[in-house]
Image (cartoon, coloured by chain):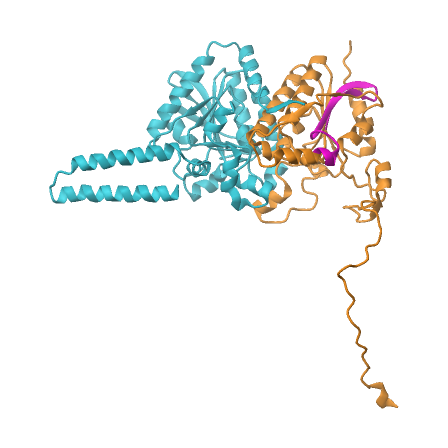
Chain colours: A orange, B cyan
Amino acid sequence: MLNGLFKKTKYVTTSAPSYENPPIPNIPNGMWIKCSSCEKIVYKKDLEDNNKLCPYCGFHFRMGAKDRIELIVDKDTFIELDEDLLTLNPLNYPEYEDKIRSQEEKAGIKEAVITGIGKVCGEETVICVMDSNFLMGSMGSVVGEKITRAVEEATKRRFPIVIFCSSGGARMQEGIFSLMQMAKTSSAIARHDDEGLLYISVLTDPTTGGVTASFAMLGDIILAEVGALIGFAGPRVIEQTIKQKLPEGFQRAEFLLEHGFIDKVVKRDFLKETIGNILHLHKEVE
Amino acid sequence: MEKLNKDLETLENQLQALKEFSNIHEVDLSKEIKVIEQKLMGLKREAYSNLTPWDKVGLARHGERPTTFDYIDKIFGDFIEFHGDRNFSDDPSIVGGIAFLEDIPVTIIGHQKGRNTKENIKRNFGMPHPEGYRKALRLMKQAEKFKRPIICFIDTPGAFCGLGAEERGQGEAIALNLMEMSRIKTPIISIVIGEGGSGGALALGVGDKIYMLEHSIYSILSPEGFAAILWKDSSKAKEAADIMKITAKDLKEFKIIDEIIPEPLEGAHKDIGEISNEIKGFIKKGLDEMKNKSVQDLLQDRYRKFRNIGEYEKR
């Protein structure tokens, strides 16, 4: 009886299944998204309905300019400025025009910033909203010009200005012209400042490079969204320079708050209210 | 450029041999030598007027290229260096102080690179931390108070990228310099003497007059960084340099800078005296042009200068 226990098992040979044309299950793409913080799978529709906040952990997903305007500006009060500026290719960078066109389609906007005049909690203000879906929100001539014109408009009308930053920095494809937009926007802010007017800068994920090193850091009041990456050099560049891993939370909004570079970290749900309150407090007495 | 350097070297060696031969054998070859010398000169002149952007990167970063201190020494008198940002520390990558330009008191601020490894470690290869920019701003405000013109020398690969720089607000420091420079009530002349790399260079560059030395470069980022960002390959720096339009000639055509300061043949390091004189001439001319301007006009012109930069059109 025991003999049988150690008996060699019989093997059955089968042919390997063919993987060349596997049947594709019919699941529509892009319905679900993984939260990069809690790693839970989130239904996209839920995310849209929840101001792009993870319903499980509250993680702040990036928000496009149009959604942002809807969230912050009072309904039917927004008048867009300078939407007709067209990006050129001063360096003749290969395929730059095509890139811009494809970004227009992808992001559904014409450049990486939308500027305009509107009301926040009933207070009139000039408002600029950058969009990181458009070529990483990078600042070239058009972005610099639109922001400068918006600041000048605010100075002329004696309005406050609120700028939502979301950008990887200066736009490489326009070379030195992009670099000079930093000086141009900062000079315009200086004139607005000279007139005793209020500038609120809101830093959202990500705010880095030439935008951090110009108007983003020049607000009279600087707010930041929870968890936003904010820095001059990107984390990858720093890691390559110093050849070591960066500590957890480095360059996040909370880190900047701790180091004294921003006034307040705000959850997206309270952002409109917070900006509204600051605007109320600065209302010019006639 | 390398091939050309080799060719020139061979020619020079041959010339030397010829000279020695004529000395030893007491044969008069002076006519022949003169012909060859002139030819050599012509070749060099042609070569240096046709440098590629990448050649210029090499010259702008040349180990012997004169630095801010060299120019301070040669152009100004009675220089006194001032230190520190009054907040955190003194950054040796940016130096500054006061001196006389002939009989005019001026404030001088510049990036400072080292001449050898030891010096470069001290100077952090001319890559400032936030306290460097804050020192620069402090000295500019001081110049404004005492109504001294400001001369800035730009020579940096870029602002430093590191933990401390981020913790202490590199972005904020540069941003504040851009904003404040735009309204400093005294004339500002900025001169790119070597590398003008990114926001770290611009933070000393919001001036009324912007000059570049003939073989210096001024760019949004180093060619290496540009290639790394756009093509994920920093070894393509040469191709990047070709595309980025970083030379003094390009930027003059773009109207980003006002004047190109010509360098001695083979570059500024070949004759520091000559290039210093040249720069001094440009500074004097620049200050003279602004001498009778009201503060209001000065600031208005400075604003317009940067306000007008940008390439776009209406749809």
Give x and y (percent) for residue B154. Answer: 48, 29
Q: Position of residue B174 (x, y in %)?
A: 59, 29
Q: Is there any visible trace of residue A207 in the rendered image?
A: no
Q: Is residue A88 left or right of residue A59?
A: left
In this rendering, does residue A103 appear at all? yes
B190 or A137: which is nearer to us?
A137
Relative placement, left or right, of B279 versus B132 is: left
Please report the residue visible at 80 percent of the width from the left and 30 percent of the height from the top: A271
Q: Position of residue B300 (x, y in %)?
A: 57, 13
The vertical placement of A260 against B258, above or below, is below
Q: Tell me the quarter of the picture where residue B10 sits.
A: top left
Residue depicted at 84% across the width and 54% down the height: A25
Task: Tell which of A165 and B14 is nearer to you.
Answer: B14
Residue B6 lies in magenta, yes or no?
A: no
Which residue corresponds to the image point at 54% horizontal and 23% vertical from the top-left? B206
Where is residue A76? Give x, y as percent: 84, 21
Q: Nearer the viewer, residue A13 or A239?
A: A13
Please identify the quadrant where the N terminus of chain B is shown.
Answer: top left
Horizontal relation, residue A233 to residue A28: left or right: left
